[in-house]
Image: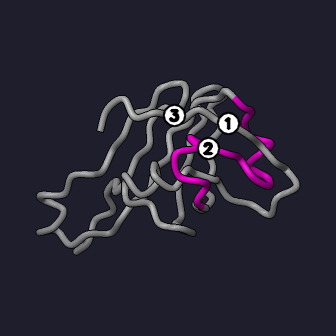
């Protein structure tokens, strides 16, 4: 039996940009994504704390150290710069691995610097 558990979470990420003219995805500064183990093109679930919108998309890396969190394509219509997001990914684990699993979690400040994690 396998169970789906939270793998990675970036909490309170502040949207830094939005571009409806992009094909899709969420840009995340590479250093933040790597810190929680998010890979390029990995499927993510995103919750917008400002308006309650929830959507699925995938990760693309932005420049490391930039603090970039950018809504691209259709997702640009689901938020605006300054909104706070919760970005999550999940993994299917065997029951034995699930028993000891701990997700990688970071909490960000308003400039997308790591406060905890």
For label 2, the crowd category at 10 Å Cα-Cα, with few meaning under 14, some 14 to 19 and many 20 or more, is many
* Mark seen at residue 69: 2
What is the span of residues highlighted in magenta in the rendered image? Answer: 61-81
CB contact under 8 Å: marks 3 and 2: yes
Camera-nearest residue between 11 and 95: 11
Residue 11 lies left or right of residue 45; in this view the side is left
In which quadrant is the N terminus drawn?
bottom left
The residue pinned by badge 3 equals: 112
> What residue is shown at x 49% (from left), y 31% (from top)?
12
* Mark seen at residue 16: 1
Residue 106 pos. (x, y %): 36, 40
CB contact under 8 Å: marks 1 and 2: yes
Camera-nearest residue between 24 and 78: 24
> What residue is shown at x 44% (from left), y 36% (from top)?
11
| Secondary element at tag 3 | loop
CB contact under 8 Å: marks 3 and 1: yes
For label 3, the crowd category at 10 Å Cα-Cα, with few meaning under 14, some 14 to 19 and many 20 or more, is many
Image position of 16 with respect to 29: above or below: above
Is residue 97 shown in magenta?
no
In which quadrant is the C terminus drawn?
top left
Question: Which sits earlier in the primary sequence, circle 1 or circle 2?
Answer: 1
Question: Which sits earlier in the primary sequence, circle 3 or circle 1?
Answer: 1
Alpha-carbon span between mark 1 and mark 2:
5 Å
| Secondary element at tag 2 | strand
Camera-nearest residue between 98 and 66: 66
Residue 21 pos. (x, y %): 88, 55
């Amino acid at each position: 039996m396998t169970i789906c558990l939270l793998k990675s979470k970036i909490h309170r990420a502040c949207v830094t940009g939005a571009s409806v003219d992009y094909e899709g995805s969420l840009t995340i500064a590479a250093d933040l994504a790597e810190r929680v183990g998010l890979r390029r093109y990995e499927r993510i679930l995103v919750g917008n704390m400002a308006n309650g919108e929830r959507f699925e998309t995938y990760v693309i890396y932005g420049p490391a150290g930039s603090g970039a969190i950018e809504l691209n394509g259709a997702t640009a219509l689901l938020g605006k710069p300054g909104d706070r997001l919760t970005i999550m990914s999940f993994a299917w684990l065997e029951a034995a691995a699930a028993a000891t699993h701990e997700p990688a979690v970071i909490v960000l400040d308003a400039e997308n610097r790591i406060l905890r994690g």
